Image (cartoon, rainbow, N blue to C red):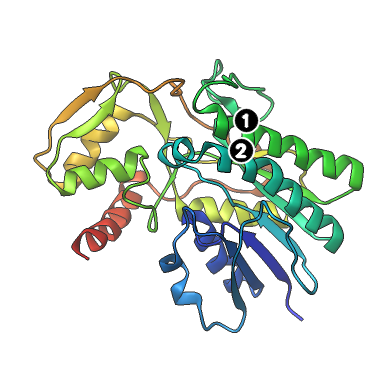
Amino acid sequence: MSKRVLITGGAGFLGSHLCERFLKEGYRVICMDNLSTGRSENIEHLIGNENFQFIKYDVTEYVHVSGDLDLILHFASPASPIDYLEMPIQTLKVGSLGTHKVLGLAKAKNARFLLASTSEVYGDPLIHPQHEEYWGNVNPIGARGVYDEAKRFAEAMTMAYHRFHGVETRIVRIFNTYGPRMRLDDGRALPTFMWQALKGKDITVFGDGSQTRSFCYVDDLIEGIYRLSQSDYVEPVNIGNASEISILDFAKEVIELTGSKSKIIFKDLPEDDPKIRQPDTTKAKEILGWNAQVDRKDGLKKTLDYFKNLSNQ
């Protein structure tokens, strides 16, 4: 029998791409999602595949899956500021209760467990670029703390299950990622800029635009996650593109790519918004043999085509 994987948050942006990848690798895939931020459209092309099963469910409740499981990927969580600021309690619950429930399932099934963590565990970093040994600079009571601390707790819970119960665990710290199946309204810079440019609206840059981000195309990220899931490495691993760009320069790139006549306007920087964000990917290179392959301009063209189709629907 082929191996069996449970992907929580499997109808989300990243989760749906993971469902495809693990089906391609010969796994039987169970996709679990309550569709609070995930979308059924992301997985509708997989319905009917005999190796794919969708379960609409909230993982903060008791989680039961019949039969054997070889691997669990825990990707259930709001991930964009607009989502986790609108759903602060749910975000904290899925990072704490949800992680606890799914780790319990991994223990019961003797399955390997991979946690989707985030670069946000580094907060507004005081070192640059950010390596995995950095403990971060997070405001636990700020508005963004609901996401940052949920993920930091999830990492602590994951390592506790590894050390105390002997569960095979992996932790990926995901940096800014983009590509098809992002929601136009998810509030992050890339889909927001592209939607504004396509509609000819002013592009809103927060602060003076000097804050930086490092954007990784989704195919590269999925490759890194897959390699980590098959590896023997227990400690957290950064996966992201180390090519850094300021938000202002990124807005100009989007305008040029779309041929838009949009103007750039500036608004106040949100509370605790990170000033810099760039992954140190040394571990991913050395341990997984992974490196980002897709140039940002090539990835942006593919993403733009997807958003054009969305805006025409």
Left or right: residue 36 compared with residue 59: left
Q: Quadrant of residue 156?
A: top right
Q: From the viewer's perspective, is residue 67 above or below residue 59?
A: below
Left or right: residue 43 compared with residue 183: right
Give the percent coordinates (x, y) of residue 169.
Answer: 77, 48
Q: Quadrant of the C terminus?
A: bottom left
In the rendered structure, find residue 138 and report the number of the disc placed on it.
none
Q: Amino acid at mark 2?
A: Leu
User: Can residue 232 be spotted in the picture?
Assistant: no
Q: Quadrant of the N terminus?
A: bottom right
Q: Give the foreground label among 2 and 1.
A: 2
For the residue labelled by badge 1, is the local secondary structure a helix, a strand or a loop? helix
Badge 1: few (under 14), some or many (20 or more) residues near its Cα, within 10 Å? Answer: many
Residue 215 or residue 200, whichever sits in front: 200
Contact, mark 2 vs mark 1 (Cβ under 8 Å): yes
Residue 82 or residue 175, whichever sits in front: 82
Identify the residue under disc 2. 92
Q: CA distance from mark 2 to mark 1?
A: 8 Å
Q: Amino acid at mark 1?
A: Glu
Q: Residue at x 77, y 39 (%)?
A: 157
Q: Quadrant of residue 303?
A: bottom left
Identify the residue under disc 1. 149
